[in-house]
Amino acid sequence: MLFRNRFLLLLALAALLAFVSLSLQFFHLTPVSTAKNGVSSKSRKRIMPDPVTEPPVMDPIYEALLYCNIPSVAERSMEGHAPHHFKLVSVHVFIRHGDRYPLYVIPKTKRPEIDCTLLANRKPYHPKLEAFVSHMSKGSGASFESPLHSLPLYPNHALCEMGELTQTGVVQHLQNGQLLRDIYLKKHKLLPNNWSTDQLYLETTGKSRTLQSGLALLYGFLPDFDWKKIHFRHQPSALFCSGNCYCPLRNQYLEKEQRRQYLLRLKNSQLERTYEDMARIVDVPTKQLRAANPIDSMLCHFCHNVSFPCTRNGCIDMEHFKVIKTHQIEDERERREKKLYLGYALLGAHPILNQTVTRMQRAAEGRKEEVFTLYSAHDVTLSPVLSALGLMEARFPRFAARLIFELWQDREKPSEHSVRILYNGVDVTFHTSFCQDHHKHSSKPMCPLENLVRFVKRDMFVGLGSSTSTNYYDACHREGF
């Protein structure tokens, strides 16, 4: 009898725990998705935690693998999560281009042999890859602002050209697009089946890798889309600042930040010895080797599992790679502490954030244009936006990184609109500087739109330490340091 009572007690306790777990998941208090490459999204204390495999101390190899973002299993994410009485109104997507061939060459070494043609029978694989190539070959009916119309719509060189998108990069964004399709179109019906050109806003820099990344995501999102409905705008600046790019104070912050980087490098004697050893191997002056930015080429070797180059003087090896990658990570950490970059980021990110907020406000008023926005950009685009938002723990943008702003309407209070912000599928809304305090006083799983509007229209300038600047022009032209 005693054994039977204990058994029933344990059974009841197990049922209670299961009920509590399911209740938390139902109300979205506990995320249940697992991000790609084993990166979990269970903790709100850190933006990219991995309690299972993340090393207890900084590991340059682990960080490099996250940066490569090698496609694996289909990714699940926190995009589109909201209580049932919230309606999705608009979505604004910022992406970094996918995996690319290096922009720099290590002097006197052979370029890594990476094939940039797209082959369905080669890894990484995606079921839409062959259809994507076929559809891109029919793209003559689309509207591309100059000089985009002169760029190839997909990579197609047996030996990649410098900076060219690889098959890995295409697959990364086909996956991103398909994931967003499943969430925003199939689940939330963001666009009708007969969507029109004015419901999309597409913008990219004038590099083939950003245009092709944008097209890959768009094809995953809207398979076999009608080319006549597609209009890609060209953005000449990596900051997407359009006609507001002249900002003297931003440039002053950037010069100070570059000086900080230089001084940190001078203090790193191990880094200098590493550069000297690598320069000896390739038989060039250390200054020339450093100027060639060898980590860019080394990351390509690493991400594609290609051996580092060798000469008759020896081989560049993993220890060289670890030292340089470790310095990059230390540089990011000091950058957050010194906060010179933050000044640059606030001014650099303001134009694109201001555009996004303006589109959100129009959507909140009931207008149906530009409900899905896509900016296909670079690491130097996303990085200042992340910093400006206060996401200091966010890792440097990996290949095919995505930052998403969602606008929601409360059906029970239609005049109220809220935002969610997600980075690589992780909800980071309450890590932002403008919504941390709100989270402490509200049980809602998102942030009021007015918080974001107030931040962009006013508080970004306050963050620069100015009590007089109330707009972007004044902030850019006031006396700096």
Image (tube, rainbow, N blue to C red):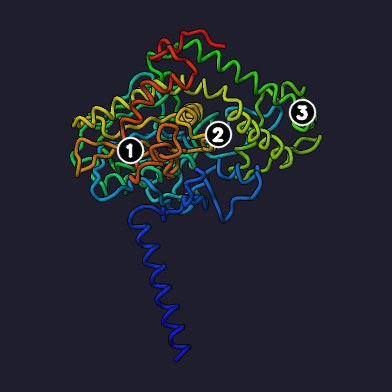
Looking at the image, the residue that sits furthest to the bottom is: 1
Q: Position of residue 452 (x, y in %)?
A: 35, 30
Q: Label 1 crowding class (10 Å Cα cut-off): few <14, some 14-19, many 20+?
A: many
Q: Which residue is mark 1?
A: 406
Which residue, given by chain and number where applicable, does mark 2 sit on?
Answer: 101
Of the pair 200 and 7, the residue shown nearer to us = 7
Residue 119: image location, x then y, percent: 46, 45
Say what amino acid the circle numbered 3 marks. Glu
- The picture places residue 304, in percent across and down from the top left corner, at 58, 43
Q: Is residue 209 visible?
A: no
Evaluate whether residue 8 shows in this view: yes
In-image side of 140 versus 205 (left or right): left
Which quadrant of the figure has residue 414?
A: top left
Label 1: which secondary element: strand
Which label number is shown at residue 272? 3
User: Image height check: is 375 above or below 184?
Assistant: above
Mark 2 burial class by Cα count in 10 Å: few <14, some 14-19, many 20+: many
Q: Amino acid at mark 1?
A: Glu
Quadrant of residue 153 within the rendered picture = top left
State the residue at coordinates (24%, 41%): 190
Q: Is residue 320 above or below residue 123?
A: above
